[in-house]
Image: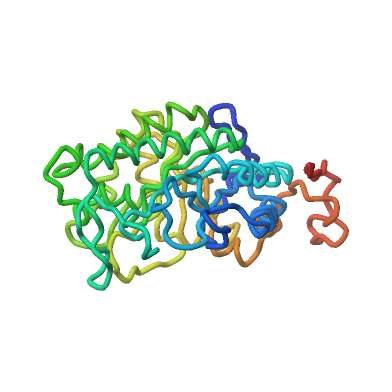
Amino acid sequence: MSAKLFSPIVIRDVEFKNRIVMSPMCMHSAGDEGFVEDFHLVHYGARALGGAGLIMLETTAVQPNGVTGPGDIGIWDDAQVPGLARLVKVVQDFGAKVGCQLGHAGRQMSIASRTAVAPSPIPFTENSRVPSELTLDGIQEIVDAFRRSARRARDAGFDVVEIHAAHGYLLNEFLSPLANTRTDCYGGNHENRYRIVREVIDAVRSEWQGPLFVRISSTEYREGGNTPQDYLIYGRWMKEQNVDLIDCSSGGIAMVKVDSYPGYQVPAAELLRSELDILTGAVGLIENGSQAEEIVRNNRADFVFVGREMLRDPFWARTAADTLRTPIDVPPQYTRYGSAWQRSQPALPAAPLTLR
């Protein structure tokens, strides 16, 4: 029986060669004002060469005060598009699809010279600065920043756009009753707390017709915070807005110790997938091919997002294929000293490797 992990899947006419995603992880290695550097070409290109079906870039900030800190990639200026386009081409030429995660750090923005904003003037921790409460006009400026950034992602040639609404950043702050105490139309109940997310999704969809993902924090690990049951409500609205996949992470809205273990966030992906009939991504301590195969084969999620293990092993996908005894396309430069299993298989077509 062939491994489902390495079966293709099509979303909105975009075909992904397997179900393995490099999870977005901030590298804090961009140049001044958020420009892509050579590091990113090597870093993301290596994981594409290593066999992942989709490479998700780290969060690209939609406004200058939307970065978490120095070195974050930006997408708030047209001048940033050529560098992003070059990076997109490298990843695609090495055989993977590439995604752009659009985000805003909100109150977790750490650059002292820039103003941190949030739905309410509640600091992240008792030692954090108090963010400025967003006005209605300020909210609309952010919604429009997401729209314009989606257009830049399209112009740069990305295959996927993901909206970052997790990990305690701005959109997560609006969704969370722990961070959002507004009494206007952007706070107070599920519908109002979701309002900015609804507006952002609509704004992004006005510029982006390709696969659209949303990353969520399915639980906040604190009494009074969101749980997976709340995301059954939010997720239903996301599906109605033509979101294609919900990427199920957790935490970030408060400083709490999380009891993490391999696959600890998979149940949320499984719940939303089964209850909402929507594609989901599972993330969080997915360590090896056998574990990843169990998740997708048992229909617990449609993609696995691999983070720290792919930092340790850029060829994690090939390692997983060897574990699952599944032949995959391997760059010809690397076939001579492949595993015994790979060497025993018929020759496969080489992935495209030309950089122009």
Image vertical order of residue 58 relative to residue 275, above or below: below
**Looking at the image, which is closer to me, 137 or 172?**
137
Image vertical order of residue 124 relative to residue 77, above or below: below
Q: Give the left or right position of residue 331, taking residue 3 as reference.
A: right
Image vertical order of residue 322 relative to residue 243, above or below: below
Q: Which quarter of the figure is the N terminus placed in? A: top right
**Looking at the image, which is closer to me, 300 or 221?**
221
User: At x 22% / y 39%, what residue is drawn?
Assistant: 136
Quick one: which residue is furthest to the left in this view? Answer: 183
**Looking at the image, which is closer to me, 195 or 303?**
195
Residue 172, position as x, y percentages in the image:
31, 50
For residue 324, say whether it is visible.
Answer: no
Quick one: which residue is furthest to the right in this view? Answer: 336
User: At x 46% / y 51%, what residue is drawn?
Assistant: 282
User: At x 36% / y 65%, what residue is drawn?
Assistant: 112
Residue 330, position as x, y percentages in the image:
78, 50
Q: Which quarter of the figure is the C terminus placed in? A: top right
Q: Give the left or right position of residue 290, taking residue 234 as reference.
A: right
**Looking at the image, which is closer to me, 273 or 12?**
12
